Amino acid sequence: MSEYDHTAIEKKWQDEWARSGIYKTGTDSSKPKQYILDMFPYPSGEGLHVGHPKGYIATDVYSRMKRMQGYTVLHPMGWDAFGLPAENFAIKNKVHPRVAVDKNISNFKHQLSLIGLDYDWAHEINTTDPAYYKWTQWIFIQLLKKGLAYESFEPINWCPSCQTGLANEDLNADGTCERCDSVVEKRPMRQWVLRIKEYADRLLHDLDTLDWPEHIKEQQRNWIGRSEGAEITFAVEGADPVVVFTTRPDTLMGVTFLVVAPEHALARTSTDSTVSTYVRRALGKSEIERTGQKAKTGVLLPSVRALHPVTQEKLPIYVADYVLATYGTAAIMAVPDLDERDGEFARTVGARVAETKLMSADEALKVSDGVRKVQYRIQDWVFSRQRYWGEPIPVVHCEKDGVVPVPEAELPVTLPDVEHYEPTGTGESPLANIETWVNTKCPVCGAPAKRETNTMPQWAGSSWYWLRFMDPANNSALVAPENEKRWGPVDLYVGGDHAVRHLIYARFWHKFLFDIGVVHTIEPFARLEFLGFILAEDGRKMSKRWANVINPNDVIDTFGADAFRTYEMFMGPFENTIAWSTNGLVGTRRFIERLYRAQEYVVSEHVPQLDVALNATIKKVGDDIADFKFNTAVSQMMILQNEIDTIKKIGKDQYATYLKLVAPFAPHVTEELWHELGHTSSIHLEPWPEYDEAKLVSNTVTIAVQVAGKTRGTVALSRGAGEEEVLSAIFSDPKLMVHAPEKPTKVVFVKDRIINLIP
Ligand SMILES: [Zn+2]
Ligand SMILES: [Zn+2]
């Protein structure tokens, strides 16, 4: 037996698999299908560290098992390469984003290939490829045609550092920019917006149909933030009526004043200098500052009074920045007696508090002419960016015809090459400076017209990419209907980020594509598994800053891809965040070495002592991979290895079975050992082993032998042995014979456990 040389073995089989194409997506539609998908990466300039491939290894293990279990498997990989990260990297390193992205992709592919992942590269996609984003643009045009994309001039989140507008989903929990942590401002500017709110109820309701972790569903529910209530109109002396939204119409009789947001027309049009100063200051604060501040502030709107719809009492109206423009109607009725925030505000400004007599909500709506209303926290999706590196929004502005979609036959609208792709800071994208590109003809009237210069956000390309993997080269349709029916929906989706954002946008676009007949399922991802991250050995996040990044290339060089893969699956529960441990990796490497050396123990005959351990391992490894409990699957394989090392022999067929169980985790060494056994085809195309239920538990039982209640020893017999059989075993054992009465007066026998002979 040669020494275990992981470098030679891994190279040899990676080359061979590429040559023979064993991971080509199956076309046999008589077999059941599995579409297994990773959240595709954006190819960063830093490449992969050891934390990144954890999810990819998991889907690799899972898809290998599924293929062996007789499924045709689609397990593709591609690149989400538009957007700010790629663009910021390119600006910082003074290379064109296209050049940087191509270089980064080839580095990522090389790294992934070293790990021995079973992707079918014939299905590779890249969101920045015009042949791909042609369809991203096509979807936008369908949204526009259905009235789900519109231009808005409302104030939006503006990152002064990234110099672009952002969606709410692009902000950190504290309201800062998710990319650069800058404090985000509100700026009024023309934007393209998608009506995701129209899908809010379906996005909420259909969560119940999904096999997703509950905490992800809960985050989506909170993000959508549906609340039921009512809109009640208050007449105002000296101004237009104010409509408020309340979740508690039953508290109407406790209302003592109204509060409007600084953005409310009543506040913005006030000529009072105290009010306008307050409004100006408030608008300079971020939403998070406004909701997070300890002391509530506000000022009275002089010379206007609201009338209580029931009592006709005159109520003061305040402007206060704890009321948000994005919630409800940007105006509330204050019930300081019952509502904590209103009470706190009343104390601050010295407003009146009255005791609230509750009335039924229906009665309150009747007497106030209120209407039931549902509010959502989710806002329509701000869909344009004032940056270069994104899909051009495929519309043209004509003086006569207004916004005109680019005819579908003319797609894609390709991103022109520019010399300066840095943001302009003027609120226009760098595309605005390329006159030859901007100036075009109106597709309707032929008059000179201008192209839209905003680009799509980085989330656009990932909002439908799973469909393109099904049919990556189709130039006449986004996906052929037969391919979509064959592969949709994604059976298993794995990633570690984007509980909202991507997973909300993707569901929204999928539902829209369902509505226009492109897909046949209402949801894109039937099952979702969320992974925990891998921290550095020091327990911190891996980062250049801490100089604690571990490159998988180095690990694979030293320990081999098989040990690396198996270790990442073994290090703890998949969903847990765990620190890297080189000691742990060394232990896993030893396991692979023991597996390799076990070929010395192979004998031609069956070894019955291994039956129980082997059958238990078949069952546990299969069940655990299916359940994403990879760590316990690996530990079961180690238990079997211990048995083999103790007995020091294993039947040839048993060893072959064992190799098949390890194959998804350690595909190279098992392929090598499989061929050493004399096989000529790949182990990865073998049927998955089945266990024998009868052999799951040991067949031998130890029965305690008592005489007059005193234990005298034990006998080992086959499970289920009867009383006669036990007695004859006792009387053929010299040590027990001497104690046992030849003719007991009574025998107490508990099958498989104990026998008591009473003299
Ligand atoms: Zn930023
Ligand atoms: Zn026109």
Image (cartoon, rainbow, N blue to C red):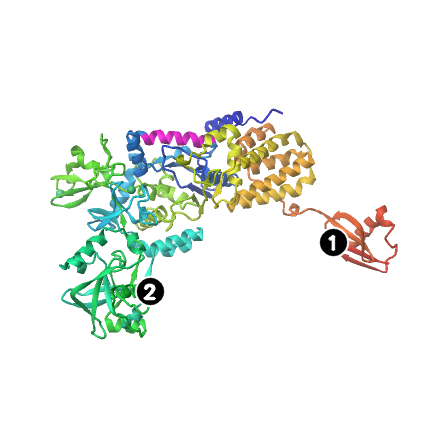
Q: As displayed, is residue 95 above or below residue 502?
A: above
Closest to the camera, between mark 1 and mark 2, is 2
Report whether 749 appears left or right of 640: right
Quadrant of ligand 1: it is: top left
Q: Camera-side residue: 288 or 567?
A: 288
Callout 2, which amino acid?
Glu
Report whether 436 appears left or right of 637: left
Residue located at (15% from left, 58% from top): 273
Callout 1, which amino acid?
Arg
Q: Residue 147's spot in the image, x, y percent?
A: 23, 51
Residue 103 is a magenta residue: yes
CB atoms of marks 1 and 2 within 8 Å: no
Residue located at (15% from left, 59% from top): 270
Residue located at (52% from left, 41% from top): 571
Mark yes or no: residue 28 visible.
Answer: no
| Sequence-first disc among 1 and 2 | 2
Q: Camera-side residue: 671 or 200?
A: 200
Residue located at (24% from left, 71% from top): 368
Q: Residue 3's spot in the image, x, y percent?
A: 60, 25
Looking at the rendering, the stretch of residues picked out in magenta corresponds to 100-114
Query: Can you tell which mark lies on residue 753?
Result: 1
Residue topped by disc 2: 340
Residue 68 is a magenta residue: no
Label 2 residue SS:
helix
Q: Camera-side residue: 161 or 345?
A: 345
Q: Quadrant of residue 199?
A: bottom left
Q: Residue 564's spot in the image, x, y percent?
A: 51, 34
The dominant secondary structure in magenta is: helix
